[in-house]
Amino acid sequence: MEKDNSLIKSIEDVFRSGWDMPALTDWGNDVTYSYGDVATRVCYIHCMFEVLGIKPGDKIAICDKNSTNWAISMLAIITYRSIAVPLLPDYSKQQLKMLCEHCDAKFMMGNRQLATLWEEGECPMYMLDTEDLLTMTPNTATDKVEEDVFSKFKTKYPNGYSKEDVHYEAENPDDLMLLSYTSGSTGNPKGVMLSWRAMASNMEFAYNALPVEPGYRELLLLPMAHMFGFAFDFLYGIMRKAHLFIFTRIPAPKMILEAFDKIKPAQFLCVPLVMEKIINNKVLPVLNKPIIKLLFNVPGFHQLICRKICQQLTAALGGNFYEVIMGGAALSKEVERILRMVGFRYTIGYGMTECGPIITYSDWKEHRPGSCGKAALNMEVKILSEDPFNIPGEIVAKGKNLMNGYYKNPEATAETIDQDGWLHTGDLGVIDKDGFIYIRGRKKNMLLGANGQNIYPEEAEDQVVTHSIFDECVVVQRNDKLVALVYVSDLTLKIHGKQREQLDLEAIRKEVNEHLPRYCQLSAIEQRNEEFEKTPKKSIRRFLYK
């Protein structure tokens, strides 16, 4: 891939030069599609668009779980120069119906169940079931459209489709490429308008920062409809002619470890929750053994134990990755302390859908504990604070990655991007002298103490998770008092040999408070029997809890 080429022409080159290379595999399925197979199916879908009168610039929605068919559908949409509208299938039926109508899509590719969102005959667009995406013969056609598509394909390519036939028109960099709806952790989703230029800037960053080479194997866990997974797991993997192995459903931990062992991915992106579960369930029980605690204080054994844990953790993730990249949420301080202590190769980035997504990043060799890196290539970042080195202020960013605005929502656009072009992230943080950003919390989440002290609930939540058995925590304010809402899974209880009803919440509260400043003391801990409702990227929907 030449970083200065158009994205569409780069994909054209990938299909031609990687024609016989493996491209896509659904994990657990023996069928692997080569880049030539993918290009052929993309061409067939283009014929379908032509038959239906879909034009470049029309919006095409895609809503389904991760799969090779999702990947092929998306590649067909963007190489046709239509505007892709990836919709996360985790939304409620009411939200999906609202988003489908809000985005003005002419065509939709998704699970057949989506047709039930409307009464019969009321669906405002053409729909294609992604499970039947690869129908290529007329004897399985169910209506005249499929017959016309097959006939058009055979007429254009009577001798079959070859790599010499792959040709796409280049995009206009200023045109819209994606309309991506935010996951709605603080309210209703908004449609983020991302241009080809913004995505090309993200690819240029990846080209310079992420060492993926042709033929590398990647394991995709993140939703491809979310910008973190879309940009750096899916699209960049395709650009580099990698072989993408795709989980089609949320896998059990055992399945993940089996996949790592067999695939040995060269790149691994995840949300911090995945790493936290691995550390809490696999590493902490070992570190808490009395004999290990004793040996930790014996000269020479500390380094030996840390090295052994790092080797085992690296091997569990396939052992072939350059670094583990986490993003989308804050990493527990205790988990980061352990990763740092054992010398594990990891880094933490920061981004937003509104930047498609990258804002900050640093290589694992440069990563600093607690930080999310420095301004990424093509981006500027600053802190709106009278003392940005010590007093948290809002993080603002500008650069090529920046969105065009929110679809049909000029008021929200004006609130988010100021007149000087700075995107107001809503996150609070500080910066060090070398430009590393440290996030302190969400501006909307900040609480005001009785004495006027600013309280960042994320800091208290981190201490609860670090110094207790609980997996999740949300701190809320009630009558100037801080209350921790907590949840612990059955698996965690089993590992620690505990019963839910036996947990001494008052003793836990006192223990946690010893690690919190006076203005941030918890007045109570309330235990939930169900985990918190989350967005598809696993951020807790905080606004639901009071």
Image (cartoon, rainbow, N blue to C red):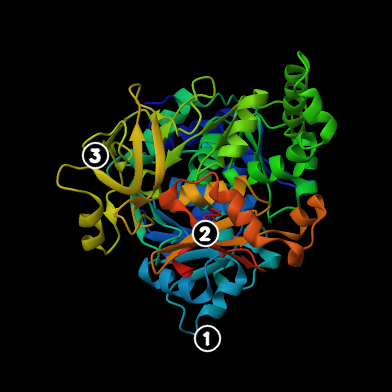
Furthest toward the top, the residue is 300
Q: Position of residue 249 (x, y in %)?
A: 69, 56
N-terminal label among 2 and 3:
3
Circle 2 crowding by C-alpha within 10 Å: few under 14, some 14–19, many from 20: many
Question: Of tags 1 and 3, which is closer to the observer?
Answer: 3
Residue 322 visible at all:
yes
Residue type, mark 3 in image = Ser
As displayed, is residue 93 above or below residue 444?
below
**Residues packed near mark 3 inside 10 Å, few (<14), some (14 to 19) or many (20 plus):** some
Residue on which disc 2 sits: 474
Q: Which-is-in-front pick, marks 2 and 1? A: 2
Which element carries disc 1, helix, strand or loop? loop
What number of labels is visible?
A: 3
The x, y position of residue 217, in whole percent, is 67, 32
Residue drawn at the location 47% of the way across and 50% of the way down: 458
Pointer 1: what residue?
120
Between 271 and 50, the one lying in front of the other is: 271
Residue toward you, 420 or 443:
443
Q: Earlier in the sequence, mark 2 or mark 1?
A: 1
- Quarter of the image for residue 284 reads top right
Judged from the image, the secondary structure of the residue bearing numbered disc 2 is strand
Cα–Cα gap, marks 2 and 1: 42 Å
Q: In the image, is 65 to the left or to the right of 374?
A: right
Find residue 315 and report its horizontal and vertical position in percent.
77, 29
Q: Is residue 99 above or below residue 25?
A: below
Could you say whether the residue bearing mark 3 is in a helix, strand or loop? loop
At horizontal 78% and vertical 30% (from top left) the residue drawn is 293
Mark nearer the N terminus (1 vs 3): 1
Q: What's the mark number on residue 385?
A: 3
User: Is any atom of residue 359 visible in this view?
Assistant: no
Q: Quadrant of residue 532?
A: bottom right
